[in-house]
Each structure stands twice: as structure tokens, then as C-alpha cells.
Image (cartoon, helix red, strand yellow):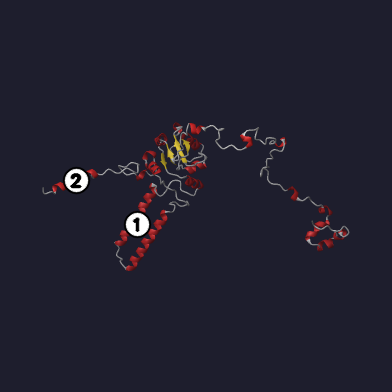
Amino acid sequence: MPPRLLTSIRPLLRSPATSLLLPPFLIPCLNPSTTHRQASILSSLSDNPLAYHKKIRRGRGPSSGKGKTSGRGHKGQKQHGKVPRGFQGGQTPLEIVHGTRGFVNVFSVDMQPLNLSRIQSWIDQGRIDPSRPITIKELSDSNCVGKIKDGVKLLADGAQELRTPINIIISRASKSAIAAVEKIGGSVMTRFYTPFAIQRILKGTTDPINSLRSERIMMEEEEEDEDERNEAEEAEDGDYRSEALVGDATATSEASTIANAVAAVQPRRSGFRYRLPDPTSRKDIEYYRDPAHRGYLSHLVKEGQTPSLFFKIPTGGKGVAGKRAAAKKALEENRIW
């Protein structure tokens, strides 16, 4: 508590000459109206509303709402003790009598459905720009789809309402939806996403379209390799064959090799911090290699191949049985008798 000034010296302190000599913290004491004490705020401190819940006082009378039987009811095992989960009163549990049915598919994915009618409605409202590629980021930013867990699947509900050509990149698409989009001059491309990659795409730190195995990226790498080969051939055909130049060329080639290795693990486009992953499981690879699904890996399927990874290109050579027959025939021809 601040010290109280004596009432006898208060008139002396009110004089202007004296007030100029006082320290600043004593000047408020000159006015009696400011010397009234306020109640301490320590007695009124409280937590925010609903910051904590009061403990339920059981068995303390009916006013608490949990008196007498304390909310357990009358008699029985549920009042006197605890009941195990799934306990059915002592009888043989039904799941043991009849057995369990069905199973949980561990390979199932939670795809967010997206109908063509909804896309056309968003285009009409100006919430989606059809002149640019439509990815899951544009769909999420415009609130065209809700929470995306494993991806988005394009469905053909309301295909007759779609009248604007669109270029959409999505996780999966039905055959009827692909046919409806391509009928009016649009295009559909399905590509692989992981849940973690989807989070980074929605944050804007990952490219939603291109990865290391995308067709455009692979074409750029082939062009870069071809340019490097051309430069190497021109260097070999040059007139300067001195040791210094050869050493510089070797150092340059080593530096370019290291730069290519570093660029292979870094994002291909500027402005993105993380690289978009590619599928690693056989099921996902075969799905996105299928041209019928408009998969982004369909350019890897050569002529005569199928999306399956177990298919071999038929060749004109003989099989194992044919080779054995040819070897046996050659052996018979070399016999003397």
C-alpha cells in the first residue's frame, strides 16, 4: 500500500512553489479525490468462460443431479461393478455363434466425388477459370470440393449440362466422364497423389501437375541430354587439343554431371519447394500407365505393350522349347553314325 500523507502537511504541499519541488509520483497525493483506494483486482481474477469444467459431485444429494445412485441406476452388475466391452450377460457372444462376416479392404481409397454439373455451375459463377488447367488446388480454393483425403474422382453426373471445354488434371475419372469431357473438346489427365502431397499442393509448395516421370519433364531431360551430347561432339571435333583445354572440358563435364544429379532431386519448376512424388506400388503404376484412364504415365507404354508390368513384348525369337529342338537337331546332324 502507498504511504498516506499526513493531513497536517497537506496544505503546505498544495502551494505552487512546493509542488514544483516534489517528485512526480507524489503529485497525485496533493488532490484528496485521488487518494481513495480501489479494490484489489486479485480478488476478481477468474479464468475464461468454459475454460474448465467443474467436477461432478456424485452421491451428494439430489441437487447435483447425480445424488443417491450417482447416475448408475438400481442394482445389478452395472451398478455394483464394471462390465467388459461386448459382454452380453453371460451368453455365448453372437459373433462367436454366427462368426464374423465381411472384411476391411486395406487397399481402399477415400476419393472425393466431383460431378460435371458442379464444374459447369462453378464456371458459370466465375469461380473457376476454364481457360487454365483445373487441378485439385483450384477445386479446393474455389470450394468446389470439400476436404480432400486421397484424391478427387471425376464422375459423369450432369454430363448433359457441361458445355464448356475444360482441361482438368485429377486423381481418377470414370469412362463416361472422360467421354463427356472429350466430346466437347476438353481433355482429362489422371495423375497420382499421396495424402501428404495433397497437403503441400493446397499450401502451394508443390507443383500439382508435373513430376520427374511426367511426359513434359522427360522430354526436357532428353533435350538437355541431346544438347550435352552435341556439345561434347563439337568439343571433340575442335582444333584445340591442348592439355589445359582437355582438363577444363573434363572439369566442365564433371560439374555438369553433378548439376544434373542435383537438379534431378530438386523441383523442376521455380516457385515450388517440394517435388511431386510418383507411384511406387504395382497397382498404382498400372492404373496411371493405362491410356484408357488417361493416365499421365501412358507415354511410357511402348507399341505392343499393355499397362501391365508383367507383359513382355512378343519377339520373333524362339522360345525355350524351340531352342531345345534346334539344339537337338544340330546335335543329330553332327553325328557320324
Label 2, residues with CA under 10 Å away: few <14, some 14-19, many ≥20: few
Residue 57 point in image, percent of width and height: 69, 40
- Residue beneath the point at 39% across and 61% down: 255
> Is residue 264 visible to the viewer in this orientation of the structure?
yes
Taking depth in this image into account, of 18 and 1 the one nearest to the observer is 1
Taking depth in this image into account, of 334 and 172 the one nearest to the observer is 334
Instruction: Inspect the image, locate mark 2, and give the three-letter code of the amino acid beneath it.
Output: Ala
Residue 117 point in image, percent of width and height: 47, 34
Q: Which image quarter: residue 49? A: top right
Q: Which image quarter: residue 239? A: bottom left
> Is residue 167 visible to the viewer in this orientation of the structure?
no
> Does 68 sit above or below residue 12?
above
Instruction: Inspect the image, locate mark 1, and give the three-letter code of the amino acid beneath it.
Output: Glu
Residue 147 point in image, percent of width and height: 52, 41
Taking depth in this image into account, of 203 and 313 the one nearest to the observer is 313
- Residue beneath the point at 77% across and 51% down: 40
Residue matched to label 1 = 228
Label 1, residues with CA under 10 Å away: few <14, some 14-19, many ≥20: some
Residue 241 point in image, percent of width and height: 30, 66
- Element assignment for label 1: helix
Quadrant, the N terminus: bottom right
- Element assignment for label 2: helix
> Does 174 sit above or below residue 221?
above
Q: Nearer the viewer, mark 1 or mark 2?
A: 2
Residue matched to label 2 = 326
